[in-house]
Amino acid sequence: SQTIHQWPATLVQPVGSPLSLECTVEGTSNPNLYWYRQAAGRGLQLLFYSVGIGQISSEVPQNLSASRPQDRQFILSSKKLLLSDSGFYLCAWTPEYTQYFGPGTRLTVL
Amino acid sequence: GNSVTQMEGPVTLSEEAFLTINCTYTATGYPSLFWYVQYPGEGLQLLLKATKADDKGSNKGFEATYRKETTSFHLEKGSVQVSDSAVYFCALIITQGGSEKLVFGKGTKLTVNP
């Protein structure tokens, strides 16, 4: 079966520290992968998507970056976190024209 | 352009009440339509979907019908339960830049009281 994993589940980081969130998908190959952010009480914002290894498209300018070092791995990073980076980060993939989401990572920047 | 408009909440109902959450869309072509549900502290779960006009998606007692003539995909449930308390997102999917992308509504928070 196909599943999507994210870790860590929760993270508390100080302002200015680096960030690395990981997303992996099992049971498929060459999936389209996505990173979303959801600020508290708000809707979803698409941050990045990837159609293959090393192929990253950014939707909004910010201090975050994404990488896809392996076929089923998608990483969200930052060199220096801002308070405004706090939120719920969701990874997603799209098999058969339907998008499915991972369990999410709740990031709090203090 | 492509957009989704859903009724703003919050919506508060008593248990066993009838639920309707309105959703209308603007899109080029005929996109697939979705309802997602987000329970407190969790990610988004696909609730139901419809891929063409007059299709009815259904799951867990929820239903929505793809209405091309009114460009709508309203979510309904005949008798809500406390466990249905969540945020509901309407969405459509488009193909852009070689990838499928979801266009979301802003979400409707539902609270069901016992």
Image (cartoon, rainbow, N blue to C red):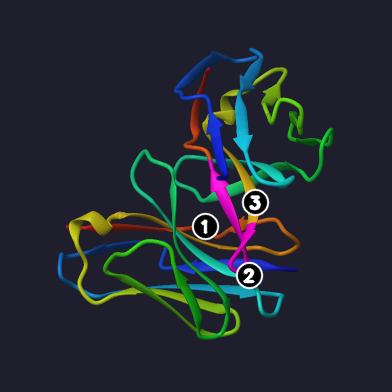
Query: Where is residue B18 drawn, in percent x and y?
Result: 66, 14
- Helix, strand or loop at mark 1: loop
Task: Name the amino acid type tagged 3.
Answer: Ile
According to the picture, the residue beneath numbered tag 2 turns out to be: B98
Query: Considering only vertical position in the picture, is B84 above or below B26?
Result: above
Q: Are marks 2 and 3 in contact (CB under 8 Å)?
A: no
Q: Which image quarter is the C terminus of chain B in? A: top right
Task: Name the amino acid type tagged 1.
Answer: Pro
**Residue for point 23% across, 55% down:** A84
Query: Considering only vertical position in the picture, is A38 above or below A18?
Result: above
For the image, the number of numbered tags is: 3
The residues tagged by marks 2 and 1 sit, at their Cα atoms, a distance apart of 25 Å
Query: Where is residue B14 drawn, in percent x and y?
Result: 56, 12
Q: Is residue B105 magenta?
A: no
Q: Nearer the viewer, residue A68 or B54?
A: B54
Magenta residues? B95-104
The nearer-to-camera label among 1 and 3 is: 3
- Helix, strand or loop at mark 2: loop
According to the picture, the residue beneath numbered tag 1 turns out to be: A103
Subunit ID for the residue under disc 2: B
Q: Nearer the viewer, residue B10 or A55?
A: A55
**Residue for point 84% across, 33% down:** B54
The residues tagged by marks 2 and 3 sit, at their Cα atoms, a distance apart of 13 Å
Q: Earlier in the sequence, mark 2 or mark 3?
A: 3
Query: Where is residue A27 drawn, in percent x and y?
Result: 71, 75
In screen coordinates, is B41 left or right of B90? Answer: left
According to the picture, the residue beneath numbered tag 3 turns out to be: B93
The residues tagged by marks 1 and 3 sit, at their Cα atoms, a distance apart of 21 Å
Q: Are marks 2 and 1 in contact (CB under 8 Å)?
A: no
Query: Where is residue B72 drawn, in percent x and y?
Result: 68, 29
Subunit ID for the residue under disc 1: A
